[in-house]
Each structure stands twice: as structure tokens, then as C-alpha cells.
Image: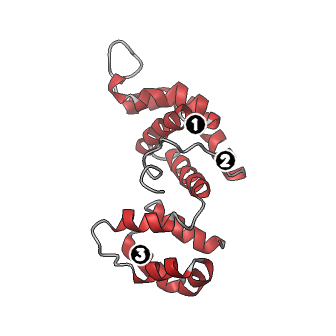
């Protein structure tokens, strides 16, 4: 699949653009989509009712028939970790996700996930006297920011240099819902 088509599909799947914006994008790239996709899927995309209430999940199921899930997951994680370097709320989510990825056998995320992500994944421990690490997730990140960033930068570098073969089993966000 060509880069510009893949990028547009990934942006929609990653919720970087709305359904209405994606609909406009499909009109701009209709000729390319027709060449890249099976006819039935192309027609489904071009005739899809983007005003449908459950449009994202219905449409994502269609798109996942035509894209490489591992490539998409690498794209999504690259964006997530790059944004995490500039936004503490996103960093909290990225750390918790690193734990989840490490727990699913993705060794690349092991250090970050098990050293820092586990604390935020089980966020109810933040502020607990027993842990005595930090009162809030924000305080935890502030305390360990430099060390966390070293690991995040390594992951970004790996994701930028390679498509990582990730074990996505058990990762509910996208994988449990789509065949």
C-alpha cells in the first residue's frame, strides 16, 4: 500500500482525524484508494455513512482487513511516545501501556514498563503509604522524568528505525475487537 494512502488510514484509525475529515480525505484520494483496495472494500469506504453513531468501530473493522496491524501498531506507538515527551498526561498513558506491552512479552518495553509503567498501570497505589513513591502520577513523573525520558527516547528510536514485531494478544484497544 502506498505511503500516502497508508498514512491517511492510520491517521483515522489513530483518531487523529474525525470521521467527517476522513470522508473528505477519501474523496481526495478516491482514485488511489480504488487502485489499492479490493473493489468491495473500496465501495464500502466510498459509500460508508460517516454520520453513523458507531462509525469508528464499524469502519475500523473494514480498514483492518486491508492494513498490516503490526505496521499500524508501530505507527500508533511512535506517535504516542513522541507526544509523551511533551505532555505528562500522555506520558502517564504511555508508561501504563509500556507495562501492558511488556507484560505481553514485548521485551522492548520491559525496562520502561516494569520500572515505571507498573506504578501508573496500578495507579491506585500512587499515594498509598505502603508505596511512599509519590502522592500523584504527576509527582511520580516529576520525580523520575529524566530516567523515564531516557527509556522513552530509546523506544522512539527503535520504533523509528524498525517495524517491531509486537505481541498484540490481549491488548484490548484495537485487537480484541477485530478479526
* Label 1: how many Cα within 10 Å (few below 14, some 14–19, many 20+): some
Query: Label 1 belongs to which residue?
Result: 149
Report crowding for label 2: few under 14, some 14 to 19, many 20 or more residues within 10 A (C-alpha): some
Mark 1 or mark 2, which has the lower sequence index?
A: 1
Helix, strand or loop at disc 1? helix
Which quarter of the picture shows residue 158? Answer: top right
Residue 141, can we see it?
Answer: yes
Element type where label 2 sits in the image: loop
Few, some or many residues within 10 Å of mark 3 (<14, 14–19, 20+): few
Q: Is residue 75 above or below residue 99?
A: below
Q: CA gap, disc 1 to disc 3?
A: 33 Å
Question: Between tags 1 and 3, which lies in front?
Answer: 3
Q: Position of residue 149 (x, y in %)?
A: 58, 36
Place of residue 41 in the rendered image (x, y in percent of width and height, measured from the top left): 50, 76
In the rendered structure, are the residues bearing label 1 and label 2 in contact, judged by CB atoms less than 8 Å apart?
no
Question: What residue did someone put label 2 on?
Answer: 164
Q: Is residue 87 above or below residue 143?
A: below
Q: Residue at x 42, y 32 (%)?
A: 121
Name the residue that disc number 3 marks: 21
Quadrant of the image for the N terminus? bottom right
The residue depicted at 68 percent of the width and 52 percent of the height is: 163
Query: Which of disc 2 and disc 3 is earlier in sequence?
Result: 3
The quadrant in which residue 111 appears is: top right
Residue appearing at x 61%, y 35% in the figure: 151
Using the rendered image of the protein, determine whether residue 146 is visible from the camera's viewpoint.
no
Asked if residue 94 lies left or right of residue 138, the reply is right
Q: Secondary structure at mark 3?
A: helix
Q: Is residue 2 toward the left or the right of residue 119 in the image?
A: right
Does label 1 or label 3 sit earlier along the sequence? 3
Amino acid at each position: 500500500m502506498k505511503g500516502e494512502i497508508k498514512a491517511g488510514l492510520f491517521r483515522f484509525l489513530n483518531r487523529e482525524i474525525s470521521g467527517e475529515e476522513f470522508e473528505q480525505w477519501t474523496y481526495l484520494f478516491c482514485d488511489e484508494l480504488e487502485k489499492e483496495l479490493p473493489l468491495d472494500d473500496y465501495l464500502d469506504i466510498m459509500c460508508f455513512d460517516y454520520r453513523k453513531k458507531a462509525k469508528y468501530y464499524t469502519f475500523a473493522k473494514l480498514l483492518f482487513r486491508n492494513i498490516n496491524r503490526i505496521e499500524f501498531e508501530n505507527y500508533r506507538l511512535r506517535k504516542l511516545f513522541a507526544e509523551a515527551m511533551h505532555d505528562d498526561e500522555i506520558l502517564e498513558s504511555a508508561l501504563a501501556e509500556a507495562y501492558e506491552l511488556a507484560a505481553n512479552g514485548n521485551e522492548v518495553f520491559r525496562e520502561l514498563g516494569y520500572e515505571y509503567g507498573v506504578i501508573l498501570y496500578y495507579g491506585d497505589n500512587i499515594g498509598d503509604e505502603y508505596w511512599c513513591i509519590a502522592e500523584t502520577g504527576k509527582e511520580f513523573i516529576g520525580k523520575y522524568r529524566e530516567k523515564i525520558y531516557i527509556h522513552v527516547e530509546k523506544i522512539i528510536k527503535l520504533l523509528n528505525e524498525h517495524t517491531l514485531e509486537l505481541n498484540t494478544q490481549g491488548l484490548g484497544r484495537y485487537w480484541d475487537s477485530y478479526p
